[in-house]
């Protein structure tokens, strides 16, 4: 009893802290949330988008006035030789003089062919494009997370499949050893059974290595300093929705299409900006100045002024070598270029959608077949195993049955992965992945 108590106590002491490990284990939803907060690529694109948003102001568009404060002070020393009309003559060396001045200057564009309003709208659209690119980067990062997470689920399923067949390989080895002991078997059967068992054990080690590598990659994608474990769901996906369910928001909410449309909108604003340069430009200017000059000699010993001026300035570029006309034509050509880009992006997205939906329906049908194949292969293997125990089937037949059961499970894991990835791809294309 003391020995048993010691062994049990030691076993419990050396068990890993499962509650602590569970706290650091993430499901798919939690993994995505951590990635959206810490992923480096997402952080970078968010900062870039924030810069674009800060630049989308009326001041950067030229709609607000510019106000400058000017001030100055200087001193001088001169030798003076002055002869006045009255006959008075002044000769003095080292005459000091000084000047103080300060002023406010305002310059406000009142009319520039509506360019400032167009520029402001363009800056807002550029900011909108930045937000769309943040969403696109988030979708790409989340899709990468989902792909790796479902791949981890697939590898875990395959590891389980190998473990399921390992029990049969061990039982086969045990039967071969028993037969040799009672004189109805041979050493060759034992060696063959050991060889095939070692082959499966090696496959299990390779699977564990692939799983650990994938967990490391997922932790890298999360971008944090903490290392997480992951809770994978190896159950197959549920029933798929009809085509209209996935296609309803395809072209309206797809990030790539909306970015292409945003570029076209920005270019149309550039056309208006180019046209506005052919109009006159009217500015309001105003100044408020104070000036004080004093001198130790001369006709005026002190001169001080305080006052303001205001007015309008008009400028009109009547001819600049047809540069404005050329810029307008280039902007119109670019507009056609971006129109083609929108059309091309929509065609690409539609084709990607068709392929993803075909992959989804194919993987779903294949999943049903492989599920049936797993059950058939398992039952067939059990029958062959029982026959092998009774000596009515050969080790070669049992090996084929074991391999058939294993391959059916591996194909089932692949079909389950393909279905989940295809559905996630459809959600990414129609803008609902996040």
Image (cartoon, rainbow, N blue to C red):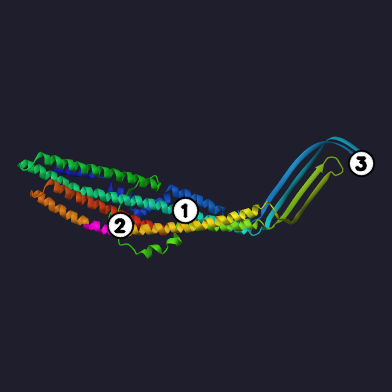
The reply to whether discs 2 and 3 touch (Cβ–Cβ < 8 Å) is no
**Pointer 1 local density, CA inside 10 Å: few below 14, some 14–19, many at least 20:** many
Q: Nearer the viewer, mark 2 or mark 3?
A: 2
> Is 178 placed above or below 376 here?
above
* Position of the N terminus by quadrant: top left
> Which residue position holds label 2?
363
Quadrant position of residue 434: bottom left
Decide which of 274, 162 is in the foreground and name it: 274
> Most prominent secondary structure in the magenta stretch?
helix
- What residue range appears in magenta? 365-372
Is disc 3 placed on a helix, strand or loop? loop
Mark 3 vs 1, N-terminal side? 3
**Pointer 3 local density, CA inside 10 Å: few below 14, some 14–19, many at least 20:** few
Q: Residue at x 32, y 44 (%)?
A: 213
Give residue 379's position: percent from left, percent from top: 16, 55
Decide if residue 427 is in sight here.
Answer: no
Give residue 328's position: percent from left, percent from top: 61, 56
> Which residue position holds label 1?
134
Q: Is residue 370 magenta?
A: yes
Mark 2 vs 3, N-terminal side? 3
Q: Residue at x 35, y 56 (%)?
A: 422
Alpha carbon distance from label 3 to label 1: 78 Å
């Amino acid at each position: 009893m003391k020995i048993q108590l010691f062994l049990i106590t030691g076993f419990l002491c050396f068990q890993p802290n499962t509650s602590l490990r569970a706290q650091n284990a993430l499901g798919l939803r939690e993994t995505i949330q951590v990635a959206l907060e810490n992923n480096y690529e997402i952080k970078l694109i968010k900062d870039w988008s924030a810069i674009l948003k800060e630049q989308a102001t009326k001041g950067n568009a030229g709609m607000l006035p510019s106000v400058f404060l000017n001030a100055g002070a200087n001193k001088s020393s001169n030798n003076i030789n002055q002869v006045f009309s009255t006959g008075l003559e002044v000769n003095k060396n080292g005459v000091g003089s000084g000047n103080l001045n300060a002023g406010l200057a305002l310059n406000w564009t009142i009319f520039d062919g509506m360019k400032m309003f167009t520029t402001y709208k363009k800056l807002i659209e550029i900011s909108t494009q930045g937000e769309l690119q943040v969403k696109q980067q988030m979708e790409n990062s989340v899709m990468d997370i989902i792909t790796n997470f479902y791949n981890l689920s697939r590898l875990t399923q395959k590891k389980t499949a190998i473990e399921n067949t390992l029990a049969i390989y061990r039982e086969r080895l045990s039967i071969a050893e028993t037969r040799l002991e009672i004189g109805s078997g041979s050493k060759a059967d034992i060696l063959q059974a050991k060889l095939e068992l070692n082959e499966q054990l090696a496959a299990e080690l390779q699977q564990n290595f692939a799983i650990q590598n994938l967990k490391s990659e997922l932790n890298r994608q999360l971008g944090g300093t903490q290392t997480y474990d992951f809770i994978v769901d190896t159950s197959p996906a549920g029933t798929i929705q009809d085509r209209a369910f996935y296609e309803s928001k395809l072209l309206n909410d797809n990030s790539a299409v909306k970015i292409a449309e945003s570029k076209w909108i920005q270019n149309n604003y550039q056309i208006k900006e180019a046209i506005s340069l052919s109009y006159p430009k009217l500015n309001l200017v105003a100044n408020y100045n104070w000036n004080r000059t004093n001198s130790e000699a001369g006709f005026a010993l002190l001169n001080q002024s305080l006052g303001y001026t205001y007015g309008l300035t008009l400028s009109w570029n009547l001819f600049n070598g047809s540069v404005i006309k050329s810029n307008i034509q280039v902007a119109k050509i670019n507009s056609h270029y971006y129109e083609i880009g929108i059309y091309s992006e929509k065609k690409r997205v539609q084709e990607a959608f068709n392929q993803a939906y075909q992959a989804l329906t194919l993987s779903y049908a294949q999943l049903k077949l492989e599920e049936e194949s797993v059950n058939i292969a398992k039952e067939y293997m059990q029958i062959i195993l029982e026959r092998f125990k009774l000596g009515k089937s050969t080790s070669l037949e049992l090996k084929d049955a074991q391999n058939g059961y294993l391959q059916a499970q591996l194909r089932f894991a692949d079909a389950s992965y393909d279905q989940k990835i295809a559905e996630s791809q459809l959600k990414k294309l129609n803008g609902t992945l996040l």
